[in-house]
């Protein structure tokens, strides 16, 4: 059987993913390109004795390496040399989408154009002469409506025919005017004479990339032959200076202008309008409201609020089912496993660890489904467009808003899917800044801590406190992002290139595929790692065990009370007193075990430093446990305060005990909440940061976030003690 590789390419929002799903169906595999976090999607088509391997390249606007996606797409074409590049084009925006097609042709790739959304073209009164366009481009052109499957069979036939023909890689030559053409020719000669990168790229294409100051190509050139590379850079500098003086522009802009000029002349006789092309279509009319300067942000916040409302509304029941299931497993293990190491490991280390991750799946699935709907419908692009102006001040990107919202920008989110959502960012600098600041928001795991302490120290101002913490998290994230962008993540911002796609009703099949891909990534990345982490934390809080001389007397008292309770019929009041005494002794036993564990000793050891922020050893233990998962903080506080197991949903007893502790006050509570809000991301988030960037940034986030949290909490506590001690809020 003959096998050919087909590269499926196109601009974002061109319908490329819809076409990929249509062609490959369930016969697709999703992973990552080696060494990077950009998704690699492959699928197969079989027809007769021909097998087509379809590789879905990341959506990109150009082949100039501004982002990981653009670099991945370009490197795949150069290194893999596919039999055919299928460029999916939004036919309603033919001129703009042809910009990428021209770059494919300049690289020399054998091309097949898919003019998608031809139904929308017809509605807009546009006529496209397919045969003439194919003749001018010297490549096949297939009209399609991918979401309805129209044109699928013709496309498959054309892909097979083109692959069998084995067309040569022949670069397209475009004139870039009297200022650039001579230097392009001069650079091309130097490149050919020195075999400079010509084993991978056409000589003229290398010349154009040097003029565009493509960092990746220049870096490859420096590594190949620095002397030749410096000669080329000198020629580029000379022509750049000339263009700036005479034309008040740069070569990169001239290249773009001439490409669009070529496209415009190419399409002059191809596109015809039956009526005024400038009339407003439905999308434009909707945008008059949804992207309005005043109404747009208001509508956007309503949409985001409804997103979280629906997530928790529809996710509450399946969430409870999964929690009940793991509770059942825990009870089963408790009843059938003998006391000891194995029982503790299975219940606390394995079942509780995996259950903590799995319980998030319903919420994440619903959230990703809504997110996929917003993306596929075209509204996500509008949100990025509206907020880009504000976020750019802080070195971020319009696309940063959704990761922030998902992470807890509206309290109750989760940093893990928020960090994963940064894949929508084109700029690597903005992406890293967004990843590192996403964990600063009040996620659903932090909210119980805030509610606990609000009930203890701010009983009349809980809503105001939550509002303050939310606003503070946004301000902190933006300020830190700006700090990063002028220090450790310096560099020019990636251009915010975006076209607002027409509004479309997403297909259910597409939504399900997109949702499942993201949920599966979450399960693979979080579900496996959290098991190991849970076991490590369990070991840290369980070992070494305390001396038997401290535990045996308590066990004797507990057994004595249990025997007394079983052999004698007491009235309900007396029975409750004995049960309370048993619980108190068990809690005291747990407290002794905790103080003698590695975690307990570490908490006591850190107390001399953490007292600057008002934290005692019990607070330290809770915060150490919170590094694994913020959900652990409340239950760890419960153990530290001799309350044993604590129900997060009904923690009033813990709230009262903390409120009555002389070591606590409202200033310490505020300091503690700010620390929890800012300090190290949970372990699952850290692993996700590493997966979406690298381990260097993941480790950096742990130390930087913890240090900055301690400095801020210390400042709040020290100023509070000095100026506001004794006041109530």
Image (tube, helix red, strand yellow):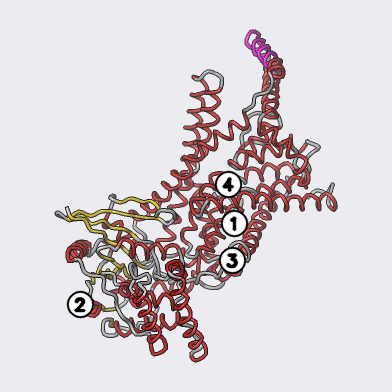
Task: Answer whether residue 295 is visible to the viewer in this image.
Answer: no
Q: Nearer the viewer, mark 4 or mark 3?
A: 3
* Residue under label 4: 444
Judge the density around disc 3: few (<14), some (14-19), many (≥20) Cα neighbours within 10 Å. Answer: few
Q: CA distance from mark 4 to mark 3?
A: 32 Å
Tell me, yes or no, whether the highlighted magenta stretch contains residue 555: yes
Magenta range is: 554-570
Total labels drawn = 4
* Residue under label 3: 490
Answer whether labels 3 and 2 touch (C-beta < 8 Å): no
Looking at the picture, how far across and down is residue 333, in whole percent? 50, 24
Q: CA distance from mark 2 to mark 1?
A: 51 Å
Q: Nearer the viewer, mark 4 or mark 2?
A: 2
Mark toward the start of the polypeptide (2 vs 1): 2
Q: CA distance from mark 3 to mark 1?
A: 16 Å
Q: CA distance from mark 3 to mark 2?
A: 49 Å
Residue 530 against residue 564 in the figure, above or below? below
Tell me, yes or no, whether the highlighted magenta stretch contains residue 721: no
């Amino acid at each position: 059987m003959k096998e050919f590789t087909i590269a499926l390419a196109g601009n974002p929002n061109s319908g490329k993913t819809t076409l990929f799903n249509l062609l490959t169906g369930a016969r697709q595999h999703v992973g990552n390109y080696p060494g990077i976090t950009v998704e690699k999607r492959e699928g197969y088509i079989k027809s007769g004795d021909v097998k087509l391997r379809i590789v879905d390249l990341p959506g990109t606007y150009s082949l100039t390496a501004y982002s990981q996606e653009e670099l991945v797409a370009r490197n795949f074409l150069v290194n893999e040399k596919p039999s055919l590049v299928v460029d999916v084009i939004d036919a309603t925006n033919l001129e703009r989408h042809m910009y990428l097609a021209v770059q494919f042709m300049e690289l020399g790739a054998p091309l097949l154009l898919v003019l998608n959304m031809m139904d929308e073209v017809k509605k807009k009164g546009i006529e496209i002469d397919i045969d003439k366009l194919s003749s001018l481009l010297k490549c096949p052109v297939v009209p399609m409506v991918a979401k309805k499957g129209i044109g699928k069979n013709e496309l498959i036939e054309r892909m097979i025919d083109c692959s069998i023909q084995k067309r040569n890689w022949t670069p397209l030559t475009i004139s870039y005017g009297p200022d650039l053409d001579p230097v392009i020719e001069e650079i091309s000669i130097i490149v050919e004479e020195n075999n400079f990168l010509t084993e991978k790229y056409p000589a003229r294409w290398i010349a154009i990339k040097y003029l565009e100051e493509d960092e990746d190509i220049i870096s490859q050139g420096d590594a190949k032959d620095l002397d030749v590379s410096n000669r080329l850079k000198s020629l580029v500098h000379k022509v750049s200076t000339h263009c700036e003086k005479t034309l008040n522009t740069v070569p990169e802009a001239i290249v773009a202008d001439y490409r669009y000029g070529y496209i415009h002349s190419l399409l002059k006789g191809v596109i015809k309008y039956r009526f005024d092309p400038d009339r407003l279509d439905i999308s434009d009319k909707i945008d008059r409201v949804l992207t309005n300067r005043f109404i747009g942000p208001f509508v956007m916040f309503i949409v985001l609020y409804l997103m979280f409302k629906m997530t928790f509304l529809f996710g509450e029941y399946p969430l409870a089912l999964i929690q009940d299931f793991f509770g059942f497993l825990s009870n089963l293990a408790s009843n059938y496993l003998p006391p000891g190491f194995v029982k503790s490991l299975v219940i606390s280390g394995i079942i509780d660890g995996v259950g903590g991750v799995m319980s998030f799946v319903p919420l994440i699935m619903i959230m990703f489904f809504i997110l996929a709907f917003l993306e596929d419908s075209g509204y996500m692009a509008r949100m990025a467009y509206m907020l880009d102006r504000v976020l750019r001040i802080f070195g971020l990107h319009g696309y940063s808003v959704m990761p922030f919202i998902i992470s807890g920008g509206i309290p109750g989110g989760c940093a893990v899917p928020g960090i994963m959502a940064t894949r929508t960012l084109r700029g690597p600098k903005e992406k890293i800044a967004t990843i590192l600041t996403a964990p600063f928001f009040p996620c659903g795991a932090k909210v119980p801590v805030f509610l606990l302490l609000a009930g203890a120290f701010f009983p009349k101002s809980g809503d105001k406190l939550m509002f303050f913490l939310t606003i503070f998290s946004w301000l902190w994230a933006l300020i830190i992002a700006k700090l990063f962008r002028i220090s450790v993540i310096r560099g020019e911002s990636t251009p915010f290139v975006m076209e607002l796609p027409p509004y479309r009703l997403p297909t259910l099949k597409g939504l399900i595929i997109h949702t499942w891909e993201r949920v599966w990534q979450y399960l693979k990345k979080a579900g496996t790692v959290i098991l190991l982490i849970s076991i490590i934390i369990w070991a840290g809080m369980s070992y070494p065990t305390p001396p038997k001389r401290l535990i045996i007397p308590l066990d004797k008292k507990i057994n004595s009370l249990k025997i007394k309770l079983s052999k004698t019929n007491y009235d309900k009041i007396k029975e409750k007193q004995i049960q309370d005494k048993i619980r108190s002794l068990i809690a005291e036993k747990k407290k002794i075990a905790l103080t003698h564990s590695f975690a307990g000793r570490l908490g006591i050891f850190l107390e001399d430093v953490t007292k600057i922020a008002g934290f005692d050893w019990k607070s330290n233990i809770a915060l150490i446990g919170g590094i694994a998962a913020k959900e652990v903080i409340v239950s760890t506080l419960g153990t530290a305060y001799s309350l044993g197991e604590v129900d997060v949903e009904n923690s009033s007893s813990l709230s009262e005990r903390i409120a009555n502790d002389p070591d606590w006050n409202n200033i310490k509570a505020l300091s503690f909440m700010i620390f929890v809000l800012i300090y190290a991301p949970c372990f699952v988030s850290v692993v996700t940061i590493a997966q979406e960037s690298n381990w260097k940034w993941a480790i950096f986030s742990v130390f930087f976030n913890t240090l900055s949290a301690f400095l801020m909490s210390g400042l709040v506590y020290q100023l509070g003690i000095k100026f506001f001690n004794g006041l109530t809020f």
